């Protein structure tokens, strides 16, 4: 909850955390829970819990029984928590069943019309065109609407071609992750202790693991390193949109790095899943959130890097309030730093703002 304090994303961190605590029990999300977080330095020597800082940390998990160096507390479990993304999305859809329709497909553009009896050059959204996933043809279908929110992760940069003049630089960071089964996972006692780890750079394997034990007995691991970087142009062409596969060498490196820290998993664990995702990273590491200038009823909500699931409820509430009222007064979130047009040249956005250059986000979280 406090990890964004002092920065422009502080409001998103705090609002989302509070919303999860309220929403999870209402939606029946069993995977949501508060849990402590430790910082762990890699080492080739066994973890010594009898001396140093490790002696004072009360929640070192039993499965951290291998080689590890300095251990310190990053969060005691009062403002650090976790939730399994797939469960949260499923529960949200179940909650709005009958009031929400899901259509799967590939968006190809938007339909607009000039505002009638108005001197404004602003155009009004009238529909979205998409190619349905359940047909064998590439014929597009028009979905009539008066508001559209582009929220397609890294592929949201395709909206550059739908809204005149808009520039949405985006880098896709294709990152591998793995899931481990709990040793002897038919036994309820085998559920791993609920402590997450943020590990330092391990030069032996090229990793900086983030280790998240889940209530279902599995352990999810990311921060595997060796990510691929996908350009805006390739993302606009749909790169890795249908299939996003893990890198076998990174799976092996992460497994070795994790098993170095855990003798329990080295001896009895089993790798369950190897997978990959595509993180959406604007040049300045800030999301695109807000109205698209020059179009009435057009909004963008994308580019949240690895914070997508963490900020999800807050982002959704901000966009809902913005669509309904034109402001985000109730949420109290200032969307100005996240302006979707901040990289659009001045002469393309009605003289407001300026083009800003940024640095690559890379592996930062």
Image: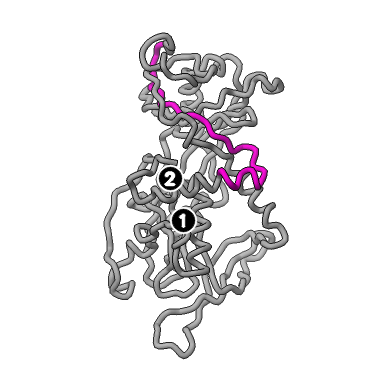
**Near-viewer residue (315 or 212):** 315
Q: Residues within 10 Å of mark 1 (few under 14, many from 20)?
A: many
Question: Can residue 237 be seen in this snapshot?
Answer: no
Could you say whether the residue bearing mark 2 is in a helix, strand or loop?
Answer: strand
Task: Tell me: 298 left or right of 51.
Answer: right
Where does the image place residue 279, in percent across and percent down from the top left?
46, 46
Where does the image place residue 170, in percent across and percent down from the top left?
39, 54
- Residue topped by disc 1: 302
Q: Is residue 69 above or below residue 148?
A: above
Q: Cα distance, mark 2 to mark 1?
A: 14 Å
Task: Tell me: 331 left or right of 143.
Answer: left
**Residues in magenta, as a range:** 21-45
What's the residue at 43%, 57% (across, down)? 332
What's the residue at 51%, 17% (across, down)? 262
What's the residue at 66%, 60% (across, down)? 102
Answer with the quarter of the image where residue 165 lies: bottom left
Could you say whether the residue bearing mark 1 is in a helix, strand or loop?
Answer: strand
Where does the image place residue 43, in percent across and percent down from the top left?
38, 17
Where does the image place residue 249, in percent across and percent down from the top left?
48, 30
Q: Does residue 38 belong to the magenta stretch?
A: yes
Say whether marks 2 and 1 touch (CB < 8 Å). Answer: no
What's the residue at 64%, 63% (across, down)? 132
Q: Which mark is residue 90?
A: none
- Residue topped by disc 2: 173
């Amino acid at each position: 909850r406090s990890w964004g304090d002092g920065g422009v994303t502080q409001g998103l961190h705090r609002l989302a955390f509070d919303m999860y605590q309220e929403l999870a029990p209402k939606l029946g999300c069993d995977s949501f829970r508060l849990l402590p977080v430790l910082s762990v330095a890699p080492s080739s020597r066994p973890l010594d819990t009898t001396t140093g800082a490790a002696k004072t940390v009360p929640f070192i998990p039993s499965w951290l029984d291998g080689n590890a160096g300095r251990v310190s507390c990053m969060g005691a479990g009062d403002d650090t928590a976790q939730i399994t993304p797939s469960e949260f999305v499923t529960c949200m859809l179940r909650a709005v069943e009958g009031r929400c329709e899901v259509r799967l497909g590939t968006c190809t553009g938007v339909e607009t019309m000039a505002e009638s009896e108005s001197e404004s050059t602003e155009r009004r959204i009238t529909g979205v065109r998409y190619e349905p996933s359940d047909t064998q043809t590439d014929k597009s279908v028009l979905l009539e609407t008066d508001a559209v929110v582009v929220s397609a992760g890294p592929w949201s940069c395709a909206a550059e071609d739908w809204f005149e003049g808009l520039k949405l630089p985006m880098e896709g960071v294709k990152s591998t992750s793995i899931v481990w089964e709990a040793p002897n996972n038919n036994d309820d006692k085998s559920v791993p202790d609920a402590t997450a780890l943020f590990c330092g750079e391990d030069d032996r394997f090229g990793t900086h693991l983030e280790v998240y034990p889940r209530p279902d007995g599995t352990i999810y691991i990311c921060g595997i390193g060796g990510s691929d970087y996908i350009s805006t142009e390739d993302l606009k062409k749909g790169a890795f949109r249908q299939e996003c596969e893990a890198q076998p060498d990174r799976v092996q490196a992460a497994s070795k790095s994790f098993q170095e820290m855990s003798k329990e998993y080295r001896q009895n664990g089993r790798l369950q899943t190897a997978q990959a995702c595509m993180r959406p990273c604007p040049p300045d590491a800030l999301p695109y959130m807000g109205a698209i200038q020059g179009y009435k009823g057009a909004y963008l909500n994308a580019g949240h890097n690895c914070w997508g699931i963490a900020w999800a409820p807050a982002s959704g509430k901000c966009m809902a309030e913005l669509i309904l009222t034109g402001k985000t007064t109730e949420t109290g979130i200032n969307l100005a730093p996240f302006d979707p047009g901040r990289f659009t040249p001045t002469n393309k956005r009605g003289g407001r703002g300026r083009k800003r250059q940024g640095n690559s986000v890379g592996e930062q979280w």
